[in-house]
Image (cartoon, rainbow, N blue to C red):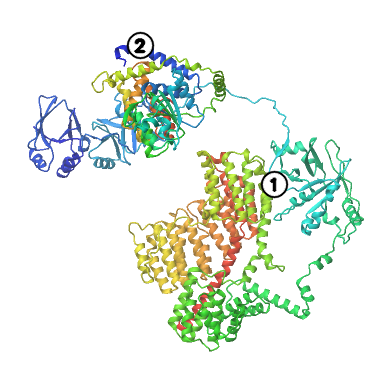
Amino acid sequence: MWTLDQLEPEIDDIRRRIQQHRRELKEYFVARDRQVDLAILCAITREPLLLVGPPGTAKSDLVVKFTQSLGLGESDYFEYMLTKFTEPSEILGPIDISLLKEGRYVRRTKGMLPECRVAFLDEIFKSNSAILNTLLTILNERKFYQDGQPTPVNLMMLFAATNDIPDQSELEAMADRFVVKIETKPVKDRHFAELIDAGIQNEAYKASGQRPWARGTASLDDFLKLGRFMDLMFGYSSEPGADRARWFPRPVFAEMRRIVRALETEDKVFVSDRKLVKLYKLIRTQAFLDHGGAVEQGDLHLLAYVGNRRDELAVVEAKVRALLGLS
Amino acid sequence: MRIGLRLRGTPADIAALTVLGERLPHLVDRPWTTFADPDGAASVLTQDSLELVTARAFVARGLDMVVWTHDGDDLRDLRIIPLRDGEEETRWTAPARRDAALLIEALRPTRLPGEPIVDEALFVMDPDSDEPHKLLERLLLLERGDAAVCEFDVEVGKGATARLFAVKVRAPPIYLLMRARDDDSAPVHVYARDGTSPLWVAWSFAHPLAEAAAANLRRREQTALVDRSGRWLRGPAQWRTRSIYDALLPEVDARAATLRPVDGELRFAIELRLAPGPPGDAELWLLDADELLALEPLIEGATGDELSRLTVARLTDGRRTRYLLRERVRPGVPPIAARVSEALGVDGFARVAGADNLYLPSGRRLRPMLRRDDLRRLLGLDEAHTVLLVEDGDGLAVVKVPEVDEAPLLRWIDYVATDRRLALDQLLERSVFEFPDVSIDWPEVARVKPERPPPRERGPKRRTKRERQRITPDVDEVAAEEGVEEDEGARLRALRAEARELERELAVGGVDDPDPWVRLGELKLALDEADEGVACLEVGLFHGGAPYDADLAATLRDAHVGLLHREGGGDLLMELLIADRRTPGEVAAVAAILIERIAAGRPPADEVMQLALPIFRDPRLPIARRLAWGALAAWHGHAGDRLGMTRAKEAILGGVNERGLSELHDLPRFVRYALTVEVGEDDGEVSREKAGERLRQGQLVALEELWRIAESRGLEELDAQANYVRLIFAVGFARLGARSSAQEIVAPVIEELDVHEAPNRALFRLYMGRLAHEASGGSDEAWEAEVHKQLDAVRGARERKAVTWLQRRSLWLASDEDAVRGRGPGRRKGYTLPGHVDLGSLTETLAGVMKPKPGNFDYVIADAVEACIDRALASGSETLIAEVLAVADDHLHSIAILGHRAEAIGHCIRGAASLGDDLALDHLLGRLVEVAEDPKLGGVHELAEAVRRGLVALRRFGGVEPARGLLGALSGVSAYTAAGTIELQSTVASGLVQLGEEAVAEAILSRLVAQIFDGSFDYVSRCEAGCAVASALRHWPNVARITHCGRFLAELDVFRDTFTTNRYFDTHKILILEAIVDALADAQTRHSDQIQGFLDLEEHALRRRIIADWSALCGP
């Protein structure tokens, strides 16, 4: 693992490469800047990202292109559409029959979720409880169970998509794991011509086997290094509140508190303790990635994506932007 | 050494301060000094008069009394020595000292945990700083335009004041509260309050003696702002607030550009074409001679009436001869277009909705839709009588047909009895081709003036009247053919004439002379109308009074038994009495047999009567009340049983009080027919079947007249309002059974449905649904489902809001069927009489409910009065009714809301009217008039309802004169609002019409209509008043309705509104139009009025007779 001393000399270069990578990736989409921003941020912090929107709004395309832009191969990427009939073996891999005869309950995980680096699970909330429980363990502990033994997974980034966020208590735990959720709305009304141009270009790339986005400026290592660097920074001082005192100015911190309180009180948006901590981490990382310094008021716009239910997403986004004076 | 009270900034402080205030009330309004702990929430409260002895007494009561001292003069080091044992001395370095004039001003507010939610917040700031601008901008970003701003002066000590700028926000955004509280650098102070307290305390702090402080401020008529340190700023009690928008000076950073009109109009050539459209019934067929001959099978199978609707004209374009076949469509008659097209093998031409003389091939429509004027100019619709757009292989052709003499097809048909095909063909050719020549104007061909048709020499002959008469001979001739002698026919005619004369005489109602009834009954029996005959005989017998005439009773018995087709032997009575079930006819027969036997001196045995009597005491008895009373009165009179007679009277009168007379059992059938004939229409003989239809026909003619007026005012295409007019009239026509007219009117709406905005489309569909509902007589549930379906189909909250705006106000579109009829109960019952209450405790129960106590709201009391009077009336006991009335009357004054008091009085009037107690009636009517004249009376709806109910009761119980008196007194009363006055006066006018005072009622109504149009009302009141008058018009005769409705229609434009929905539709115009069409297409109300009028008079007569019979046995 990298140490702070190793990372510090090159961290600014890494930051700039990821910024450039982000700019380049946005070129291949129409009006998906925020989704790309969040995908990059979640990749750095290894937080899962939930894309909420109807079919045909480039959710899958975004994840695929992002994966390919990191130079990852087919085996590093796992994509699956979940239904209520999906069985754990469909995403974790089938039981190895030969080992089963020996009394061992081992899955063959090659090409499946446990061995991939990036995963995209479509219609995640339509899956059954067996899948949800497995995913919760993977997201929380980055491991799954093989023959009763916890086995680490390679998963670094999880993207999920859904058309709706059901208001069911059994799904709340999974929904809460997604600290940020973003809507992907159709853009044809505002970007009719651009959409067609970009779509046709995309088809042409596909037909000719070209993948210009795959020559991403940043590598997977860059993302891992920046994530590692942030983790080291958070633990730099053992004194409680040291990171906040240095990187989160008091007025901005108070602003964050006010916004969270306003969302909870007035819009009944539930922000769990876990989510609040992760939000801090995301905001800090976002600030560091964007300008390399302390958190500024504008970095708090990440709070616009903390809504839990489908109907909250747009309301929260508008509210946060209004409170921050960004409208 | 000074004494002080230490407060901890906890809720326990309130108890300590309360004890302090109770023990030392004289110190509360003295100056106090506070030292605040710089490191915590505690403070020490001190007053010069506090002494050690007092302090020790307080310590004994648990107060934290302290002795405080300080080193030096600057109070920088305060020593606090608790007087309670075991507590240690503490020191405060540099405590904040504050002197206050009162105890409440000296207290330090306590911090509340978290971020409390408050009702209202006040953001106070320096008006000259940037903060107001920032705050207002932020509030507008948060869409909080409901905030208010104000500026006011506060006392800042020594008589000085300071001007502050404040923003008052209800349910304030927590973000702004926290921002103002947390951000010390921002000079914005936020205060909050719950409710309407004059005390504003810094947000998230609470004043320990908030209620006492608020009371102090109210006494002084002041408001105070208390900051977190406890400092008070006093200001005036009332601030002049303004909307947040009034504090804005909007600016726009944009370049200005003004567009000016310039000469020149761009025109674009658009090709008119025919496109598939909805299939419509064809009316015209343009045929060759061969095609016309194909009509033969249709002619063979069609009825004379159907053929009479077909006309033919012979035309030429100079090259070939064409025949124009036209079906004259009549309202209410199904067209035969489909059969004609099938017979001819060609599709005809259907009329284009909105264009009278333009015809398109059936199933085609014009694309694009053009304005009618453009269409007229383009196709030359004004230059020809009929224009057809013909589509063939060469494209479109505009065929113009001048006005021609279209001859009925019947005229050219000869029915022949021959099997010689040649002769038949010759006949047909001759009849078909001998039409007068006229020209047809094809495209590019000059219009040829039609020649005058030559006199027809040959051709089929029309049947003479005499011949037609032979085909449908009248009844008399049939009788003659069947061998009935001429003098017998004359006798029957004479009997019929006499019967009709008597019917007219008796149909006015209330005739209690038995002779005409008996005579009419005999006539009916002679004319073989036994069912009506027995009804008349029953009335005659009843009015003859007990003891009954034996011969008449025998006739009645025979008639009843005859109706059962049974022999009237002695076994029949027992057989009927012991049967498990009895038909109404069988019960009537039992009554008739009993009456006859008692009248003839052969009374049944007591055991038999014990079986029979309960039958007639049942208030749900399915026979005429008169007959039931006859049976009971005959028996009890014969037995001399006064108690039985009294019980019988109560049973019959209770049933009548509760349910009134039955239209089914107590109304002789001839009365219904007699009343269907409007005044002035009875100059000719009207068959009964036709009479039932005449009212409806009258309504139809009236509605057609009104529709013509509406059309003449111009109904533009692509105009939503015009479509509403069409739809409303279409619903009216559908209600009267003229479905084809309705479809014709609504066709343009269907065609241009897609052109209109979503709310209008949805409402159009709702009206079309209503049309189908009226035409099909669908159930309430089906209509509910239809409304929900249409509303669910509206997407977008704004559009749905616009749709429901009109739908809920509309007379026809409301989903609740009660609302549709406009006669709904309005609100649910506030009081239901408990099941355990018996008649003996009725007055006690009512007195309990009417006593003022919590939960006895005025509407509950009014409903209780209604329930108790209903129960008393149902008992038939005059004593009980009088007792209930007395209790109700004593407590009427306790009903404070005058509308509900009027309701209760209305119910009391019913009771008093049933007793015939003129004094009580006068008293109650006087109270009702007092309510009406009281300036505190708000809405008149309840009063109008009370008047209506009172009038019904007065009419039923024979109080016509008091009813007139009431209406006379109310005719000069003005309500609080002009619209209320109109509603009240409309009720008065309706009542007068029902009492037969049509001239007076008409004068009142004309005055009301004039008021509506004289421009003195605001928009809403005018509409409400218009709807009230239109609703009253239901009770008017047709002729008067047309006059008034016509005026409403002519001046429809005055019913404007300023609702936001008028970007889609004009609400008031639609509501008024609905109201007048509804009134005009209502054939039921007036007829019901007349029927009810007859029943009311009959009920009164019945009541008199029963009382007379009872008095004869039991004494006055």
| Residue A10 image position (x, y, % from top left) | 35, 11
| Residue drawn at point x = 63 percent, y = 44 percent | B723
Q: Does B363 appear above or below A262?
A: below
Residue closer to the observer: B313 or B1082 = B313
Q: Name the residue under label 2.
A: A10
Say whether residue A157 is visible: yes
Q: What x and y, as percent, mark residue A304? A: 40, 28
Which residue lies under the disc numbered 1? B712
Query: Mark 1 packing: few (<14 Cα in 10 Å), some, or many (20+)?
Result: few
Image: A200 above or below B735 = above
Q: Which of A53 and B1072 is in front in this view?
A: A53
Chain ID, mark 1: B
**Horizontal and vertical percent position of residue B36:** 18, 30
Q: Tell me the subunit letter for badge 2.
A: A
> In the picture, which quadrant includes the N terminus of chain B?
top left
Amino acid carrying label 2: it is: Glu
* Nearer mark to the viewer, of 2 and 1: 2
Which percent across, then down, holds residue B504?
A: 65, 72
Dot 2, how many residues are within 10 Å of its Cα: few (below 14), some (14-19), or many (20+)?
few
Q: Which of B514 and B807 is in front in this view?
A: B807
Figure quadrant of residue A48? top left
Residue at 35% x, 57% y is B855
Say what secondary structure mark 2 lies in. helix
